[in-house]
Image (cartoon, rainbow, N blue to C red):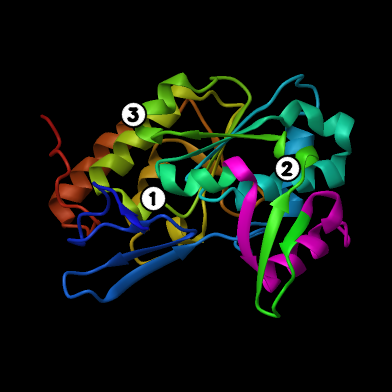
């Protein structure tokens, strides 16, 4: 049974349909506008390069706080956990665990309690490629593959590395650890109205220090609805790293940039996903 939640992107009258790892946004005529899915080792992120960056950036840090919001069925936090274990080894990777995985949708999280993930044969190939054919160390196939679909059962050794919670990043951000934190918030930003995007970026920039990272996705940076997100990120001090879609936080970004951008928004009529931005106060 599917669920619907609001509010999300106000460009569309209907909300995304949740309750599975494929989430769609439909217009008022019932036509699909966006479909966002999750999978193991989603190919818009350079996973091996990300683990290398995490290892280097936090080499002298005893504990790293990793958060994965909009985690869906757990495919992404489990992907990161597997690769940390594979590339760094259990002892060196331990400081990144547990990964805190959070989703707004309680229905999809019911599956994570049982450790069941419905995937495809592409997932199987992606996992074996990332782990050098070591899938069996982390997952069991709960049902034989039919050539197209796979059902995975997460093994305890991997399941213990991720803790799942129901939550809302807009409300939770003030409770995140300020230091040495990695926030994965991927392929979800265009679902938020423009003002919510800006407010959330402000909260993230204020909460997390400059030894923290924000990781987004293709849908957030390169889709048709993403231009406002990227401008707002740049002006708030989110700087690119060598890993695509991974950003460092710069606490020293001058607030004058924000005032200038607000002026340009109002006077140049730039297109945003949401029209309810506050005008520049004089």
Q: Name the residue: 78% across, 55% down.
A: 140
Q: Name the residue: 15% across, 52% down.
A: 275
Quarter of the rendering occupied by the N terminus:
bottom left
> Which secondary structure lies at badge 1?
helix
Q: Name the residue: 73% across, 38% down.
A: 54
> Which secondary structure lies at badge 2?
helix
Q: Is residue 238 left or right of residue 255?
A: right
Callout 1: 10 Å neighbours few (<14), some, many (20+)? many
Residue 195 vertical placement versus 211 (above, below): below
Q: Is residue 71 visible?
A: no
Q: CA distance from mark 3 to mark 2?
A: 37 Å
Residue 119 coordinates in the image, percent (x, y): 63, 64
Please tell me which of labels 3 and 2 falls first in the chain: 2
As for residue 115 lying within the magenta part, the answer is yes
- Give residue 189's mark: 1
Callout 2: 10 Å neighbours few (<14), some, many (20+)? many
- Give residue 81's mark: 2
- Give residue 85's mark: none
Please tell me which of labels 3 and 1 falls first in the chain: 1
Span highlighted in magenta in the image = 113-139
> Which secondary structure lies at badge 3?
helix
Residue 52 coordinates in the image, percent (x, y): 78, 44
Please tell me which of labels 2 and 1 falls first in the chain: 2
**Mark whose residue sits in front, 3 or 1:** 1
């Amino acid at each position: 049974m599917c669920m619907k939640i609001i509010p999300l992107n106000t460009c569309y009258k209907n909300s995304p349909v949740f309750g599975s790892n494929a989430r769609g946004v439909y217009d008022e005529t019932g036509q699909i506008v966006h479909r966002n899915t999750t999978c193991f080792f989603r190919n818009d992120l350079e996973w091996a390069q990300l683990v290398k960056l995490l290892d280097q950036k936090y080499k002298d840090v005893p504990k790293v706080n990793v958060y994965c919001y909009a985690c869906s069925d757990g495919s992404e936090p489990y992907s990161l956990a597997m690769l940390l274990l594979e590339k760094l080894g259990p002892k060196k990777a331990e400081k990144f665990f547990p990964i805190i995985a959070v989703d707004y949708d309680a229905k999809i999280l019911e599956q994570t309690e049982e450790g069941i993930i419905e995937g495809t044969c592409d997932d199987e190939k992606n996992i074996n490629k990332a782990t050098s054919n070591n899938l069996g160390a982390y997952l069991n196939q709960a049902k034989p593959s039919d050539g197209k679909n796979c059902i995975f059962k997460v093994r305890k050794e991997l399941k213990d590395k991720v803790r799942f919670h129901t939550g809302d990043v807009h409300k939770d951000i003030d409770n995140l650890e300020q230091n040495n934190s990695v926030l994965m918030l991927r392929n979800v930003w265009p679902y938020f109205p423009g003002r919510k995007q800006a407010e959330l970026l402000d909260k993230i920039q204020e909460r997390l220090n400059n030894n923290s990272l924000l990781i987004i996705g293709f849908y957030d940076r390169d889709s048709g609805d993403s231009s406002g997100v990227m401008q707002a990120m740049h002006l708030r001090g989110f700087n690119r790293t060598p890993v695509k879609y991974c950003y460092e936080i710069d606490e020293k970004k001058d607030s004058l940039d924000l005032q200038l951008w607000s002026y340009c928004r109002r006077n140049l009529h730039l297109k945003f996903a949401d029209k309810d931005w506050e005008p520049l106060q004089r």
